[in-house]
């Protein structure tokens, strides 16, 4: 038996243990791979954080939400949409708006009380 074979015979059990440990580690990573990928998708990127903290004007918010500026104004006046007033201008934070939308979300079959659309008045002639 050569000197190399003698040395290898001495360390062979340690190498086999190391190989078994590495195999277990690789298998463990494989099992948790999906969980790791899903968890990293839930992390906000700097661009998302910046978008949430950005102050939007009424026109910018309506464009971002895909609704009319009139709807944004109506939500602000009649439904307590969170707003920051600076001078005579109104600004909206996207994270506050998203929280408000979630809090006021309704399923399609729910409806508010009927609202008065107009007032009919008698006119004397």
Image (spheres, rainbow, N blue to C red):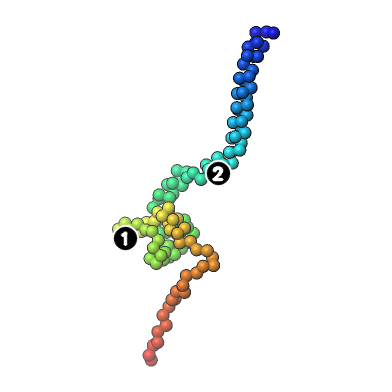
Residue at 47 percent across and 56 percent down: it is 64
Which residue is at the front of the view, 112 or 117? 112
**In the picture, which quadrant includes the C terminus?**
bottom left
Q: Is residue 37 left or right of residue 84?
A: right
Q: Give the farthest residue toward the left.
A: 87
Name the side, left or right, on which 100 lies relative to 20. left
Q: On the image, numbered disc 1 is attached to which residue?
A: 88
Which residue reaches farthest bottom? 125
- Foreground mark, 2 or 1, reads 2
- In the rendered image, the residue lying farthest to the top is 2
Mark before the other along the chain sequence, 2 or 1 = 2
Residue 74, compared with residue 8, is above or below; it is below
Instruction: Return the residue nearer the eye: 71 or 104.
Output: 104
Residue 22: x percent and y percent?
Answer: 60, 27
Location of residue 93 in the rendering, given as x and y in whole percent from the top left corner: 40, 54
Residue 113 has which mark?
none
Residue at horizontal 50 percent and vertical 69 percent from the top: 111
- Element under label 2? helix
Q: Position of residue 14 (x, y in %)?
A: 61, 19
Disc 2: which residue: 38
Quick one: 3 or 59, which is closer to the camera? 3
Picture layout, residue 106 above or below residue 17:
below
**Crowd tier of the residue under label 1, counting other residues whose Cα lies within 10 Å: few below 14, some 14–19, many 20 or above:** few
Give me the residue at 69% from left, 8% from top: 1
- Per the image, label 1 sits on a secondary structure element best described as loop
């Amino acid at each position: 038996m050569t000197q190399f074979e003698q040395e290898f015979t001495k360390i062979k059990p340690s190498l086999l243990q190391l190989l078994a440990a590495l195999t277990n580690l690789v298998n463990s990573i494989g099992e948790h791979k999906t969980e790791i990928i899903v968890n990293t998708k839930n992390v906000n990127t700097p661009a998302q954080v910046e978008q949430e903290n950005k102050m939007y004007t009424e026109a910018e918010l309506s464009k971002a939400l895909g609704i009319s500026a009139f709807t944004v104004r109506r939500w602000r006046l009649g439904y307590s949409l969170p707003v920051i007033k600076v001078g005579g201008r109104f600004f909206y934070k996207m994270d506050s708006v998203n929280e408000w939308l979630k809090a006021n979300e309704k399923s399609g079959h729910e409806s508010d009380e009927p609202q008065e659309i107009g007032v009919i008045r008698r006119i004397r002639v």
